[in-house]
Amino acid sequence: MKKSLLFLAALLVAACGRDVPPTGSSAPGPSWLFLDKGPYTLTSHVDLTGEAGLVLVTDRSLMAETPDTVLTRTVTIGEDSLLTVALGKLEPGFYEVRLNDSLRFNIGVQPDKVVSKPDPQPDFDTFWETTLSELAEIPAEAQWELVPEYSNELRQCFRISFESLDGGIGGGIISIPVAEGKYPVFIQYMGYGAEPFYFDPSANPDRIDFLVSVRGQGIFKEARTDWIDRGLQDKADYYYRGAFCDAVRAAEIAAALDKADQDRMVALGESQGGALTAVAAALWGKFKVISIAVPFLGDYRDYARIVWWPVHEVMEAADKQGIDHEDLFTLLSYFDVKNLAPRITCPVVMAFGLQDPTCPPHTNFAIYNNLGTSDKCFWCVPTCGHAMWLEDSWPPVRDAFIAERL
């Protein structure tokens, strides 16, 4: 989907005041994210001049043969390339603006009011209680290997591995202060297929850093990378049942470290890492604060209405195995992060990119709006796609939110 981002400043919208409802603000001036009740006027510089046809469609119909059209206008764009068009009142949600079928970009309306109700199966809680009970029967022990080249007098670095559910192996890279004492623990969950990295031993010497690899990914990365398609025949065999347990087991091991301050446990992640962060907070429940950016695996049914990957790829895999789509969505509901979100009661800060074609904003807010905590806020970069990790504005917002709650 082509996005015209030319001439638009990187407008940043925040709703991150402690104990303040996420109403937010925008600067400098109008942006593509509307947080009030409307009516709305879209004002933006675009790379067009003259007369153009404008169509506004709902995001949840983008994969349809004929998307749902909210309005059509003929607009005149001046020589300064400034587009101004009255949109009227719009329902909370996300929309795609189409100009002459050549320029496309997303806008959002009151995202914290978007409704995407959890749809857990009747045995959802039992399924996860049984799963966690099975995990608890496996000793929470890790194998440790010192990594001298990333160790110094301040922190020592280790590669670790541990056994998890059904014999799966998880682990990661951990950096631990040398000096005696208790330290906050920052657990970072990795994105889908992301490459592992090592922590600078001289950076953040007053905390424990743990980069977590779930089975088949990170430091255990396999040649076959279609993790999301694995085990579709039965929810007990689905890849993310084991991967979610790996995320929980990593938290358990980190909390049990002699130098871990169990009252200052933090989790953070982007994309799949954001999903695993939320899942660990939901199933383990002992984090002080978490940060999730462009979180993955939220609201599978609507996901399939907005973008192709990953849900349609999973549907194709199901077709090859003779699995009915309704049965597939029933299975996926056990691993839908929005169904686990109500269990999360710690503070949460979330970042999203309004132009994200991989984890669309609607799927982010399917998680955010179902969180079981009122101490939450979101940060938006309207021009950003999925790569929130490249946005310089995000880390200061995230770090300030976390620091205040530690």
Image (cartoon, rainbow, N blue to C red):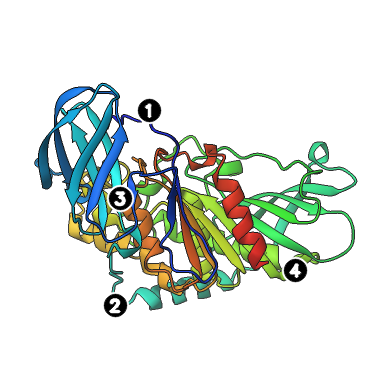
Please, is residue 296 above or below residue 285 in the view?
A: above
Image side of residue 86 versus residue 273, left or right: left
Query: Which residue is depicted at the point 28% across and 30% down?
Result: 82
Q: Earlier in the sequence, mark 3 or mark 2?
A: 3
Q: Earlier in the sequence, mark 2 or mark 4?
A: 2
Dot 3, how many residues are within 10 Å of its Cα: few (below 14), some (14-19), or many (20+)?
many
Query: Which residue is depicted at the point 80% across and 64% down?
Result: 259
- Answer whether residue 318 is visible to the viewer in this image: no
Where disc 1 sits, the SS reads loop
Judged by depth in the image, the label closer to the viewer, 2 or 4, is 4
Q: Amino acid at mark 3?
A: Gly
| Residue 268 figure quarter | bottom right
Pointer 1 residue = 7
Please, is residue 310 above or below residue 91 in the view?
A: above
Q: CA distance from mark 1 to mark 2?
A: 50 Å
Q: Earlier in the sequence, mark 4 or mark 3?
A: 3
Pointer 2 residue = 122
Query: Which residue is depicted at the point 52% across and 45% down?
Result: 216
Asked whether disc 4 touches disc 3, contact meaning CB atoms under 8 Å apart, the reply is no
Pointer 3 residue = 108
Where disc 4 sits, the SS reads strand
Q: Earlier in the sequence, mark 1 or mark 2?
A: 1
Judged by depth in the image, the label closer to the viewer, 1 or 4, is 1
Asked whether disc 1 touches disc 2, contact meaning CB atoms under 8 Å apart, the reply is no
Q: Position of residue 213 (x, y in %)?
A: 58, 49
Quadrant (top left, top right, bottom left, bottom right) of the C terminus: bottom right
Q: Earlier in the sequence, mark 1 or mark 3?
A: 1
Image side of residue 295 versus residue 136, left or right: left
Asked whether disc 2 touches disc 4, contact meaning CB atoms under 8 Å apart, the reply is no
Q: Position of residue 92 (x, y in %)?
A: 25, 59
Residue 261 is tagged as 4
Q: Amino acid at mark 1?
A: Phe
